[in-house]
Image: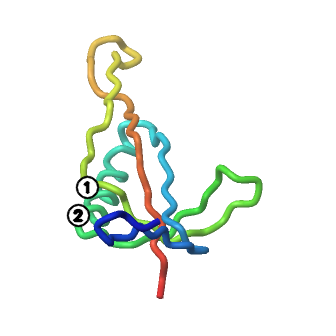
Amino acid sequence: MEFENGNAQFQQVSTNAKKTWDFYIGGTYDEYESFISFFESHALGQKQFYWYDNFVSTPIQYTVVFNSDDFKPEVQYAYNEELNKFGPVGYKWKCSLRRVIET
């Protein structure tokens, strides 16, 4: 499409269009510590890692990066089994991944 001032608008046709996934990650508070270590080592420098898309009938492996270096999980709290200590027991976080096209 060409505009009156001579500028034109183009849409790139590509077989490798930008692909992202948004989903929730959650687990126990013990798993939280492991996940935060992984997140901090990959998100800040946009370090690539492999991820399997399990949301399809046949899982497919992609090379991805975190879409953001912002980590603000919802932490769940509860009393322990003896009901004498209140503290964190789990977490939930909305994760966003972006596919990286390897050259």
Residue drawn 41% across the image and 51% down it = 96
* Dot 2 and dot 1 residues touching (CB under 8 Å): yes
Q: Is 46 rendered above or below residue 20? A: below
Q: Which mark is residue 69?
A: 1
Left or right: where 31 falls relative to 60: left
Q: Quarter of the image holding residue 47?
A: bottom left
**Disc sitting over residue 44 in the figure:** 2
Q: Earlier in the sequence, mark 2 or mark 1?
A: 2
Say above or below: 63 vs 23. Answer: below
Identify the residue at horizontal 26%, vertical 17% (top origin): 85
Q: Residue furthest right?
A: 57
> Which residue appears farthest toward the top when viewing the image?
83
Q: Residue furthest front?
A: 4
Residue 14 vs residue 98, the one in the foreground: 14
| Closer-to-camera residue (18/3) | 3
Q: Residues within 10 Å of mark 2 (few under 14, many from 20)?
A: few
The amino acid type of the residue labelled 2 equals Leu
Which structural element holds mark 2?
loop
Cα gap from disc 2 to disc 1, whole angstroms: 6 Å
Q: Position of residue 56 (x, y in %)?
A: 70, 53
| Residue 13: % across, % down | 56, 73
**Between 90 and 62, which is closer to the camera in this rendering?**
62
Residue drawn at the location 34% of the way across and 11% of the way down:
83
Pick the residue in front: 103 or 45: 103
Q: Compared with residue 65, is residue 68 higher up or lower down, i.e. above or below? A: above
**Residue at the image point whose x is 24% and y is 70% from the top:** 45
- What color scheme is it? rainbow
- State whether residue 14 is above or below residue 26: below
Q: SS class of the residue under badge 1?
A: loop
Question: Would you say 87 lies left or right of 80 here?
Answer: left
